Amino acid sequence: MILRDADQDRDADQDPEEIVWQAAKIGYDHLVGQVAGGMHGWRAAGAPVQELPPVTAAQIGRARMLDIRQATEFVAGHVPGALHVELGDIPTRAADLPPGPMVVMCGHGERAMSAASLLARAGHHDLAVLDGGPESWAAVTGRPLQVGW
C-alpha cells in the first residue's frame, strides 16, 4: 500500500517536503511513503480509524479548552481559561494534561487536529477540534478574548 508516486493521493497544492517537515515537527520522523488510495485505501484495507469530531464554538459546552498555538499567538488573544501547550510540546506534555472532555484549538483547525491526534495516541479520550479559532469563539459567545497570560 505504500506509493512511490506521491502525487497520486494528496491534493495538488500539498508540497511533499512540507508534509514531511510538519510530520517531523510532531514526532513522526520515519516516514516511508503514503497509503495508496489515501484514507479510502486505508479504510478499504480494514486499518483502524479513529475520528476526532470538529465542533463549532456554539457546541463546546463545558469541555476544557486546549490552545496549542505558539506563545506569541496565545498572549495576543485566547479563550479565557484555556490551557496552553504548544503543538511541538504535546508529545512530551500529554501526560500532564487533565483527563476529561477537551476541545483542542489553534488559529483555524489544522494544527489542532494534529495535536488532538497526538493526544489520542497518548491515551486521552473525549477529544474534539474547534472548527475555527479564538476569533470564532469570540464571535459566537460575544465575549472578549483574554490578552496576555
Image (cartoon, rainbow, N blue to C red):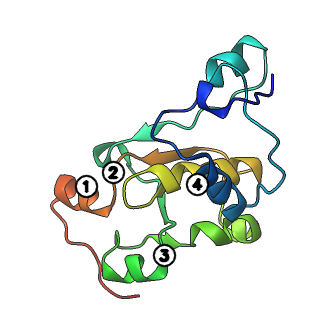
Q: Residues within 10 Å of mark 1 (few under 14, many from 20)?
A: some
Q: Nearer the viewer, residue 61 or 28?
A: 28
Residue count near mark 4 (Cα–Cα under 10 Å), binned few <14, some 14–19, many ≥20: few
Q: Is residue 59 left or right of residue 26?
A: left
Q: CA distance from mark 2 to mark 1?
A: 6 Å
Residue type highlighted by circle 4:
Glu
The dot on residue 70 is: 3
Disc 3 and disc 2: Cα gap in Å? Answer: 16 Å
Task: Please report whichever mark, 2 or 4, sits nearer to the chain's N-terminal start.
Answer: 4
Amino acid carrying label 2: it is Gly
What residue is pinned by disc 1? Answer: 136
Q: Residue at x 48, y 75 (%)?
A: 70
- Image spot of residue 53 (x, y percent): 50, 36
Seen in the picture, residue 13 relative to 115 is either above or below; the reply is above
Callout 3: few (<14), some (14-19), or many (20+) C-alpha neighbours within 10 Å?
some
For residue 41, side relative to residue 12 (left or right): right
The answer for how far apart the CA atoms under marks 4 and 3 are is 19 Å
